[in-house]
Image: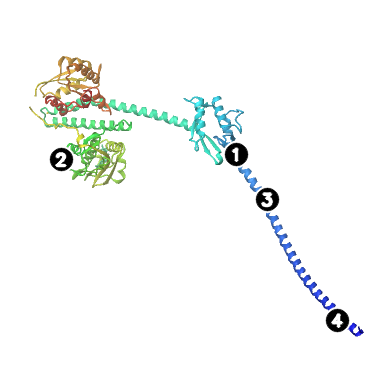
Amino acid sequence: MSLANKLTEERRARLAAERLLELKQAELFAANRKLGLHAQRLSEKIVRTRAEVENMRGENQRVKSDLSVANRRVAVTERRLWHTIETINDGFAFFNGDYELIMANRAYIDIFDGLESIRPGVNYVTILQALTDEGIVNTGDMTPAAWRQMMTERVQADAPEPVVIKLWDHSHMRLIDRRGPGGDLVTLGLDITATVKYEEQLKEARAMAESASRAKSAFLANMSHEIRTPMNGVVGMAEVLGETELDEDQRLYVDTIRRSGEALLVIINDVLDNSKIEASRLELNPEPFDLKASTEEVLRLLEPSARDKGLTLHLDYDHFLPSRLIGDPGRLRQVMTNLVGNAVKFTAEGSVTVRATGVPDHVKGRVTVHMSVEDTGIGIPKDQQERIFGDFNQVENERNRQFDGTGLGLSITQRLIELMGGRIWLTSEEGLGSCFGFIVELGVADEEAAPVTVPFVSKRKVRRRIKVLAAEDNKTNQLVLRKLLKELDLELVFANNGEEAVQLFQETDPDLIFMDISMPRMDGKEATQSIRKLEECSGRRVPIIAMTAHAMAGDEKQILAAGLDHYLTKPLRKAALIEQIEAVLDDRFVVPWPAQEAG
Ligand code: ADP
């Protein structure tokens, strides 16, 4: 090869090597740049991670300090809670689901008076055993085993009923148990000794008050008896005297005596009723009765006073309202007499209207009776309307003062209506009139069940000579009875006590006996029982009519149960006495239920 060729080749090879170098240098440069970028990203990441780590470290510190604050709080709260639980006088204990004591406060532990076995871990059954074995609990009528059985069964219930246990020192504890999550049991033993003692004191005070009330009631009953007996003389003699020849002045005096006596009797009856209601001794005697007829009767009785004042009385009886109802007719009549009596008393002119409405519920067999008594009288001022239903309360103004009364009528009326389960109200405008309304729910009576009543017809044929035996220890009352019956052609024999009555019954064979109840040696009920015994062989039954001043609830039943046939309350009224005699004469003496039952 020529030199020139060699040089050319060498130059070519050098150029190729230079190009390769350039290429490798460019690659190296690019690789360096890539490496630089990567290193930059890496250092950026490291910076970020460092910041995050710093952050986390701070967070961790915060959580740590929060946790220790929370722990401190929990400890304080727990301390306070236990302090509180320890401070309360009531026993407090925790049991786990296996009825093992977890913890209990001092009040709970103290009950066991230092008994070592009562500590955390002890079982509920062991606690019950300790309570009975150590005589800590007074199991009363139950044997210790039965008591433990009862307590064990009780605590196993999902929601145990509270129970009161009595301890040896007469203290009382109410145990209240609540089941917690996981079957835990929280027991609270409330010391209710003070409450129980207070209840016992209340019971004692109540018993004392009741016995005082009974004593008051008995005193009033006796007083009424004592007052009625001489009043019998006053009213009866005034009636007898009124039938004799009298000049005008004398008649005025006699009428005044009779009216005052009757007014006094109304007061005695009011006081007696009031005390009976207060002593809860007033009982209602529901029976079938005719509401329309008994309302008419009340109006008929008050008609003369209304007529004297020029007032008209109206009765508006709803034709949908049945008249045969079941209720206490005597007490309803008393309510109506008081309301209509007041309406007449406090009305100078115009009218008094009684309305009775009510639609019966035939399915229930009952009806809500709505009755109202409306007058055109002096009215009652708004501010006095509530108080007039109170005991002895009357409207206090000049206009009202001219009327007499006890102020007991409306109080008795209201309480009677409440006793019947009803309600009374009043609307009134002073100077225009008053309207008293009340509702009571009554039973609807079966028409067939109505007792057949014999109409009262006077036959002056209200006579053969009949023999009447009267047992009466009081001489004045003997005189009253003799005078009241003097016009009748009868033979009247007096017995001074029950023993004499039985003897005279055998000796005289009377057609009728009037029998006082309270008498010395033998009372009227015993005498009647002896007479009924004596009659057993003859089969004859003489009508015996009680004459009594007793007017307490239940007296009438007792008297009839003793074998008497009828009952007259003193003071005796001539009309009532004569009616009994007429019944014997007409042979229509109806023997009432006690005798029918016995027969
Ligand atoms: P008393 O009629 O014996 O005074 P009451 O208890 O029946 O007792 O009535 C209390 C009072 O209510 C009466 O004194 C009277 O002031 C008032 N009063 C009752 N009814 C009426 C009436 N219809 N009109 C006006 N005042 C009445």
- Within 10 Å of disc 4 (Cα), the crowding (few <14, some 14-19, many 20+) is few
Q: Residues within 10 Å of mark 2 (few under 14, many from 20)?
A: few
Question: Would you say residue 570 is visible in this rendering?
Answer: no
Closer to us: mark 2 or mark 3? 3
Question: x, y (%) of residue 123?
Answer: 58, 32
Report the front residue among 509 and 246.
509
Q: Residue at x 77, y 71 (%)?
A: 33
Q: Is residue 243 left or right of residue 269?
A: left
Q: CA distance from mark 2 to mark 4?
A: 165 Å
Q: Which residue is mark 2?
A: 307
Judge left or right: residue 180 versus residue 205. Answer: right
Task: Give the quadrant of residue 311.
Answer: top left
| Measured Cα–Cα span from mark 1 to mark 3 | 27 Å
User: What amino acid is at disc 2?
Assistant: Arg
Tell which residue pokes out farthest to the left in this image: 461
- Residue type marked 1: Trp
Circle nearer the N terminus (4, 1): 4
The mark nearer the N terminus, 2 or 4, is 4
Q: Which residue is mark 3?
A: 64
At label 3, the amino acid type is Lys
Report whether residue 157 is seen. yes
Dot 1 or dot 3, earlier in sequence: 3
Q: Position of residue 189 (x, y in %)?
A: 53, 34
Ligand 1 resides in the quarter of the picture at top left
Query: Which color scheme does this rendered protein use?
Result: rainbow
Circle 1 sits on which residue?
A: 82
